[in-house]
Amino acid sequence: MSTRRIRLNAFDMSCAGHLSPGLWRHPDDQSHRYADLDYWTELAQLLERGKFDSLFLADVLGVYDVFEDSRDAAVQQAVQVPVQDPLLTVSAMSAVTEHLGFGVTVSLTYEQPYALARKLTTLDHLTKGRVAWNIVTSYLESAARNLGLTNQISHDERYDIADEFLEVCYKLWESSWAEDAVVHDRERGIYVDPTKVRDIDHDGKYFRVPGNFLCAPSPQRTPVLYQAGASKRGQEFAARHAEAIFIMGTRTEVLRPIIDNIRRQVAEQGRDPYDVKIFALATVVTGDTDADARAKLKSYQEHISFEGALALYGGWSGIDFSAYAPDQPLKLLHTDAIQSAVEAFSKADPWREWTPQAIAEWVGIGGLGPVIVGSPTTVADELERWVDEADVDGFNLAYAVTPGTFVDLVELVVPELQRRGRVWTEYEGSTLRETIYGPGVRRLPDNHPGAKYRTE
Amino acid sequence: MSTRRIRLNAFDMSCAGHLSPGLWRHPDDQSHRYADLDYWTELAQLLERGKFDSLFLADVLGVYDVFEDSRDAAVQQAVQVPVQDPLLTVSAMSAVTEHLGFGVTVSLTYEQPYALARKLTTLDHLTKGRVAWNIVTSYLESAARNLGLTNQISHDERYDIADEFLEVCYKLWESSWAEDAVVHDRERGIYVDPTKVRDIDHDGKYFRVPGNFLCAPSPQRTPVLYQAGASKRGQEFAARHAEAIFIMGTRTEVLRPIIDNIRRQVAEQGRDPYDVKIFALATVVTGDTDADARAKLKSYQEHISFEGALALYGGWSGIDFSAYAPDQPLKLLHTDAIQSAVEAFSKADPWREWTPQAIAEWVGIGGLGPVIVGSPTTVADELERWVDEADVDGFNLAYAVTPGTFVDLVELVVPELQRRGRVWTEYEGSTLRETIYGPGVRRLPDNHPGAKYRTE
């Protein structure tokens, strides 16, 4: 067995219920503190103590309104609403940590590259090189309606726009300012050498950006790029641009061919297939013993909201399960969307009778990832098995309750994985990209498509 | 003589030279630390020690490229470039302070109200009600070109858009969520009462926002509204919406009629004329004695950059003074723009021979506001005179060098003003709006136009 390092990433969102609808009712849950800075600074310090690579902040710009053709279930159960902007907590978390990375989700559908590039560079400066951008193209109709689009842009065109958006960003980040443009030479009276700042002259199909970037080069220049696209076009985009890819799947046998395919696509782009770190969504429920952990899981399961879970899944899938009885066997229903959902769930558990209730139970803790339950030894065994069998680089760890799930991970599971040499005991390097690629690698690797825009 | 409280506000920007071009070369200046969080957290703590109302962060989204028809002078002298996003430092500053307000500049020309309202509400939650939005409509062509506008929108139409933008924001902030919508009732399983969240159904000339707001009500709901528009249309906008107005003028006799006019316009909107707090731009240079202060000023003046100052003024006025000799008397030049500039400067000092060099010296410390120089007693006398003669509520204090200018203010001038009963010795209330209107007033006053959108 290899002793490949297992990378840990925490998955959270500025809302009261990220991927555990209804669990805000659990007495141990503090997710309602999402609007308090203390929640975030304490979480960041906890994760750094557990040597996590980064905290990944999800986001949506709309509400989940498919279930019962209404947002009421989502609102009542606080299913990713109310939801706040993920970028604005980062500087406070950065001020109390030294190594933890911060992955922020920003949809490029509603941003201009000139302004977004500045926001991310600002964060990269303020965090001293610890920022990642999770690149998303928005999927919610409810967001599009409120943000000036009369219709959602088609899925594939969203990725065409995204490719050009990235091109503009690379030009701003990598080519507009030479590395030695800022001299701050008090004697000669030159703060910036103007011959080393150039216009990017971008004139494309979707964007026109003639000028120079507004920011001086930050420690990483291009922030670390995260992506989570599951579609064919999304994977193609990720294989080209992403440095970390976030996937979902419930069994290693299901994930392995998907991961092999991603690595092959990455190689086809001229990159090292292992230059992309792949994180599998998972939720860990642990306690001192297997029995303790199972008891904890049971108490979590009792707090799942049926309506909340189906509101969440409805937003992702477009399927409104409110039309069916909770115990209706779904394989009997012959709509394409439902059959494709049943097919996906059957991969997770082929022996289960999939009903709306079963889906709610499945989705209700940790969304579409596995729930890994047991003592620290049991959990560590399972995480090792995943890495070895599925060829993932680590886990994107959602919470059942927060910060409890993360406290359990840091206090119980991380020490066990450290004893096994699977989780590092100290960070190497100081920027997030060094955490990913090793000390000294603060910039995009040379074989990354963004690197070709460098002028030096 | 009244003992009306004098309000202090600090004026800064996420860049290396805000309103003192060239002074980055001064040995006492640390403005190059603008990209370090420590600079901001230390400054916030300093200002809170000095009982400042707020820290006001300016912003631009383009470069100053009028002087020599080039950005080179601005870039070389770091005249508001490089420049970073002002919102992203706020949470770190908020975490180390309890009372200081944070005024952030965001141009609505390049934002969607649905997304911007969420950003500001997020900050209002994270700061526990200490955020102000400085509403601007962008003036730089260089910004418009890079942000997807082929032409700058005309000045007056920018304010029409701004009026509707605010209307959308008021609906989101004041009417979409009832005050008691969030119940977080674990027993009944209701986090948010969905009957208390409503769609805003906005369908206007510039914006269409049918849905509900994404955030729960923040402590202030609508952030405190700052405005600095000097034009007729800008003042009309400010009289309607602003709770604090920032003005520039170099002599009390010049400012007094402008301020009287603002208060009259505010009253015409059905508001109390003193519900709008008026802050005059000023830069204070102080030392233990008048002679010390004058020596300090001299050393600052020696570091002004001629090119940097004219790059800055060129960006504001559109006038390129590089075509003239530094000692060219401007009153001899008969272009409309230059005569209007000479007229403005002659109000500041009618006896001075205005030349490009004289303008650079004037603008080079503190932009278009006065420089108030002397011992703490002298400065306090002068600030009191301004308040009494010009009817301003306080000062928007720029720096010559940072944090030195602010340290001098807090250590020397504030104690003197406190002895005179002019600066308070403790904050009252906890939100920024309470700092402005008094304890208990956390929401827009009833006579503010935003208040009419309240549904309760």
Image (cartoon, coloured by chain):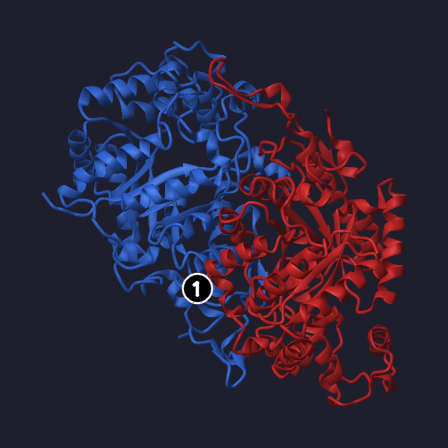
Chain colours: A red, B blue
Quadrant showing the N terminus of chain B: top left
Residue A182 seen anywhere in this rendered image of the structure: yes
Quadrant showing the C terminus of chain B: bottom left
In which quadrant of the rendered view does residue B403 lie? top left
Q: Nearer the viewer, residue A309 or A42?
A: A42
Q: Nearer the viewer, residue B453 or A212?
A: A212
Number of on-image labels: 1
Question: Residue sitting at 58 percent across and 56 percent down?
Answer: A47
Image coords of residue A453 (percent x, y): 75, 32
**Is A350 displayed left or right of B260 in the figure?**
right
- Indicate whether A287 appears above or below B25: below
Image coords of residue A139 (percent x, y): 72, 62
Image coords of residue A3 (percent x, y): 78, 52
**Is B403 displayed left or right of A231 in the figure?**
left
Q: Amino acid at mark 1?
A: Ser
Image coords of residue A200 (percent x, y): 69, 31
- Indicate whether B20 appears above or below A90: above
Question: Residue sitting at 65 percent across and 36 percent down?
Answer: A221
In which quadrant of the rendered view does residue B297 lie? top left
**Is A135 displayed left or right of B71 in the figure?**
right
Q: Which residue is under mark 1? A: B218
Which subunit holds the residue at mark 1?
Answer: B
- Crowding around mark 1 (Cα neighbors within 10 Å: few <14, some 14 to 19, many 20+) is many
Callout 1 secondary element: loop
